[in-house]
Image (tube, helix red, strand yellow):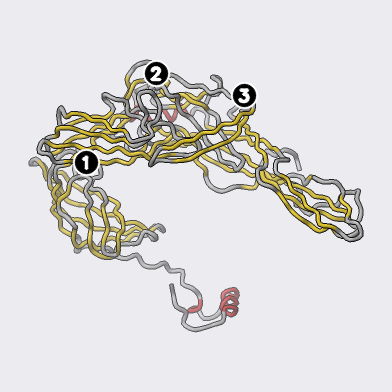
Amino acid sequence: MHTLGRTVTPFLSMLLAWSGCGDPSLTPSTTPDPVPVPMIGTLSTYSAAVGDPVRFQGSGFITPDRGWIEVTFRGTYEHDGVSEPVNMSVEVAYESDAAAMWDRFGPYSIPFTRAGNTLGTFVGEVFATNFTYDGREQRQQAGTFHPLSFQVMPSLVITDLRASGEGASGERFESDCNFTGTRLINFVPYRMQVEAVGFEPESFTYTVSAGMMSQTGSPESEPTTIDHPASSGIDSLGEIEVFRFAEVPMGVPVYRASVSVDAIASDGRHFEQFMMVTVHQPVWVRYLGGVDLAEIMEPIPVSGCMWGDINGMNVTYSETTSDIRSITSAETYTQGWTESYTESHTETYGESGSESNSIGFSSSDERNWNWNINGQVMAGGEAGVPLVANGKVELRVGGGRDWGGSHTDTRTGEQAWTQTASYSEAVAMTDSFAETISQAISESWTVSSAHSETLAIQRFLLPNHFGVFYRQTTRLIREGEIVAMDLCGNETVVGRMILNDYTWAPDFAMDLECPPLPESGLPDAQCLIPPCEETY
């Protein structure tokens, strides 16, 4: 904040600003606050196992409301007589002007080496950089970089996490990703591989949060514990048992889950690893934000001619469900996106010439969209878009309880659906809606929507006047993107979706005679974003 050089009245200050003249010292400065210069002076520890916290102490760390902090390690990693060059940056959390925290060193493997599973010592220097949300940055001054020798201690590391399982035809598949990361797809089986680095394990215990699917195909409502005796220093979750997560609940774009591993060494020591993941649908709608006014319809009278008599009278209009409109959600997508999407990912995620990961936007199989991996139908599901009167839309592409094959849910007529889901730490919610699926070859879904909030206005009808209530319908639109996720957790925008919704406004008009009907004060009908119901 800048202090003004002299005191003026608020009115005079505004007048000078409007006129563009006056003392320049009275005009607020538009120069942004300078970016502080960070400095790392010491570390809380100079040795750590993967997953341990490491605190950087110094000065000048930028606050989260202005930007973020990155710490850069530059030097070499010495292990087994080999020196690997290191030049990596990690984002750390702000604690205070004098401290920033790397919450989890690694966080899942040894960061200084490409293999991620070799003990050694980093030798070099470390420095900090402040970044602002408006695109500026400030690096720690050269000559003040902190010299560093940092030893990596025995650790339990996660060396792999990828989609891996059995397809509909019985053949096994495995995504060709370097590392899937923490964005998983519901119903898809995964394999997680861990390794004991620098110690001899006796057992591995995995704890998967609620949401993991049981062998019968139902989601577990409590954490699942799986014990493996150690046969070597490497172990995998998903080799013996099926490791996959249940469907994302209706109305929720994603839910959180977690996997923790506890390895007990032969000397009794415990080594732990913890991974938070998010579970997604393979295809969903992401709103682009905002609501646009598309159409203002002609005001219509909703009452007869009311007479005010010689004394006048209070008149009230209210309605709750008198106007029912269809909400239509139509999606468009680029023809051939499946081929281009598949081709662009073939080298990384599939065999040459195969259909590695695609979603068929087809209504020929009773509105069942198939999601394919390497040409095999891995999961199928309903393609309906459940909508509610407030304009929410959820694009649901998922599978049945059994892995492989396809699941078709054909809906005709009007029906009510209520779903309750509770995944412990993940989500707890209940959704209810009514929907009608239109029978059309195009990708369009229509939902019956009744006005759910009471419209009520009270007016005084003047003596010897006539009064009429009007109601005007307004069409609103929301735009979204159809997003597909491949097996490696990467997103691709494959289409766009427009959702129409409606709202209503009342009015009261008076005149000395009726008929003709008194004219409404509501705006004239307009078509702002076609297609519209009528031509105005």
Quadrant of res 113: top left
Judge by depth and name the residue closer to the eye, 453 or 67: 453
Q: Measured from the top left, where is residue 459 in percent x and y?
A: 78, 57
Q: Nearer the viewer, residue 201 or 54?
A: 201
Q: Which mark is residue 412?
A: 3
As drawn, 460 above or below 214: below
Going from the N terminus, do you reach mark 2 or mark 3 first? 2
Cα–Cα span, label 1 and label 3: 51 Å
Residue at the far left in the pictured view: 81
Mark 2–mark 3 Cα distance, whole angstroms, equals 28 Å
Location of residue 190 with respect to 80 vertically, above or below? above
Under mark 3, the amino acid is: Thr
Q: Give the residue number, with chain letter if any, for mark 1.
A: 272
Residue bearing the label numbered 2: 168
Of the residues tagged 2 and 3, which is closer to the observer?
3
Residue 473 x/y as whole percent: 71, 45
Q: How crowded is the residue under tag 2: few (<14 C-alpha within 10 Å), some, or many (20+)?
A: some
- Amino acid type of the residue that numbered disc 2 sits on in the rendered structure: Ala
- Position of the N terminus, as image quadrant, is bottom left
Residue 528 visible in the displayed image: no
Name which of mark 2 and mark 1 comes first in the sequence.
2
Whether tag 2 and tag 3 are in contact, CB under 8 A, the answer is: no
Residue 187: percent from left, percent from top: 40, 28
State the residue in front, 45 or 217: 217
